[in-house]
Amino acid sequence: MTEIPKEKRLELAIEAFHKGQFPSKTACAKAFDVPPRTLMTRLDGTVSRQHTIANCRKLSNTEEESLKNWILDMDKRGLPLRVSNVRHLAQLLLSARSKPSKDISISEKWVSRFIQRHPELKSKYTRQYDYQRAKCEDPELIKGWFNRVQETILRYGIAEQDIYNMDETGFQMGVASTAKVICGSETRDSHAKSIQPGNREWITIIIAINASGHALPPQIIMAGKKHQSQWYSAIPKEYRISLSDNGWTNDILGFEWLQEMFEKHTASQTAGRYRLLILDGHSSHATASFDQFCTERRIIPLYMPPHSSHLLQPLDISCFAPLKHYYGQKVREMAENNIHAIDKQDFISIYSSIHGRAFSKANILSAFAAAGLIPFKPERVLAKLNIKTPTPPSSSSSNQSFYLGRTPVNLYQLNQQKKQIQELQSQSLSSVVAEQMLEKFIKSTEVAMQDAILLRQGFHQLHTSNKHQKGKKNMTRAFIQDGGSLTGSEGQQRLIEREAIQEPSRRPRRPARCSNCNEEGHNRSKCPAK
């Protein structure tokens, strides 16, 4: 008897006692080798812990099982779900069986507790953060930088609102950002693998921010030979698009930015006589023409020490990271919606939607403060030189739990279990076994309905993807300029002019001519001379 699991012995004991096979509960418990008190509580209606759902649990066991299987399936396909995705799917399952009047929501901490309940799952980052960048800069070198900044400001009487920082940052169009995702715990990799859209074409953005808290319009550098009309359908007018062979900046485009973007957008905003432009030592910033133009326009370029931008440059400290994060989020959302072909038009649309968030006034002010510039506090940077990156704590692996009992997972198993239940009922055999099989039968139906809810969400994402792709296909592609650069307003004006030239002049349709009398205005069947 002891070879039979305890839970099974309890079920048999309950059935035997109800049939009157034992005079007392104690005798029944002794016969089936189960604790008498446990048998008494079960006879009073207490449910086993295995089948109990805590009051704080939002989803049932079968709902959590369906969600877990969906997560594992998405992980195997290379699209592990983010925490926000898991929470959204749990909300869908909860809403599907709740009354419409009930306002029940999944909390932010629910996903963490859900992962703890399922050892098959764990959360990890999709790619590794780079902790290898050296933080061994010479403090004296950093102090020398701040001395130069202070001396330059005092020498030229530069006002705070005339201090700018410029830099370039690059994007691979189809690369999503790091995201915490939920995946299978059996994988040995410390970081999950996520499918990325295939386009790795490089795009460079030249941007400048001001110490008073605003950003200049960006110059977008893309690989190509001709400007295409669809790029300018929804681009802000002050943006500028430039073309190069590989999507990188060069000496010509760097000087063009200084002339066409920095000078035009800052000359009229100057509070004093001079403007301070903080930048790195990239070759496109150190040409003779760049330096001469700065001298003529009272722009003071101040170059940071090599390999120190992560400590000294405001853009690197507080702006580029959120910019890349927001862009990666958008790319990931498109991938989750089955949009895997991200082109230049998509990039412009995505960038336009996130520029304001990344370069908010709060972010820019925080960037200059963290760089020790405004307010002038070099100690904020010098203190970072002693900070060591902590080693992330190792997480102990949980013991794999196993599930007793078989629930049908396909139509064949469902039909086989149906036949077995019918046979047990016709033979009047153990009702406990029949009830267990019926529970599995019902559970399989619940799982199927829950999978249908999750699949409907997948179909919705696919519909969104198809709608996006169809809209792009319907747009007319036209070349409006060979090479060079255009602002958003210039591109839109070229597009209007091109459409006006190409629009055909419609000739009025000639009236019908009668084949009988050769007069216009009627046909042969209505001819008055007939």
Image (spheres, rainbow, N blue to C red):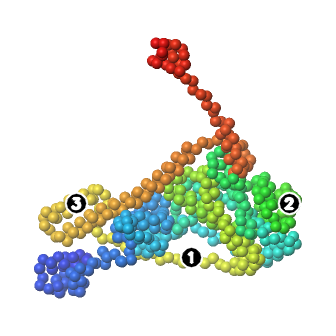
Badge 3: how crowded within 10 Å, few (<14), some, or many (20+)?
A: some
Toward the viewer: 517 or 345? Answer: 517
Residue hosting label 3: 418
- Counting residues from the N terminus, which is met first, the one under dot 1 or under dot 3? 1
Which is more toward the observer, 18 or 139? Answer: 18
- Residue 350 visible within the image: yes
Q: For the residue marked with disc 1, what is the amino acid? A: Pro
Q: Select label 1 or label 3 by which is in front.
A: 3
Percent x, y for residue 309?
Answer: 73, 68
In the image: residue 466, left or right of residue 380: left
Q: Position of residue 308 (x, y in %)?
A: 74, 70
Residue at the disc numbered 2: 297
In front: label 1 or label 2: 2
Q: Which mark is residue 392?
A: 1
Residue appearing at x 70%, y 58% in the figure: 218
Label 3 near label 1: C-beta < 8 Å? Answer: no
Lower sequence index among marks 2 and 3: 2
Q: Position of residue 102 (x, y in %)?
A: 38, 69
Q: Relative to residue 10, is residue 227 drawn left or right? A: right
Of helix, strand and loop, which one carries label 3?
helix
Q: Check disc 3 and give the amino acid type.
A: Lys
Q: Secondary structure at mark 2?
A: loop
Does 332 sit above or below residue 122? above
Residue found 71% across the figure and 55% down from its top: 238
The disc at residue 63 is none
Q: Circle 2: is it few (<14), some (14-19), or many (20+) Cα within 10 Å?
A: some
What is the three-letter code of the residue carrying label 2? Arg
- Residue 136: in sight, yes or no? no
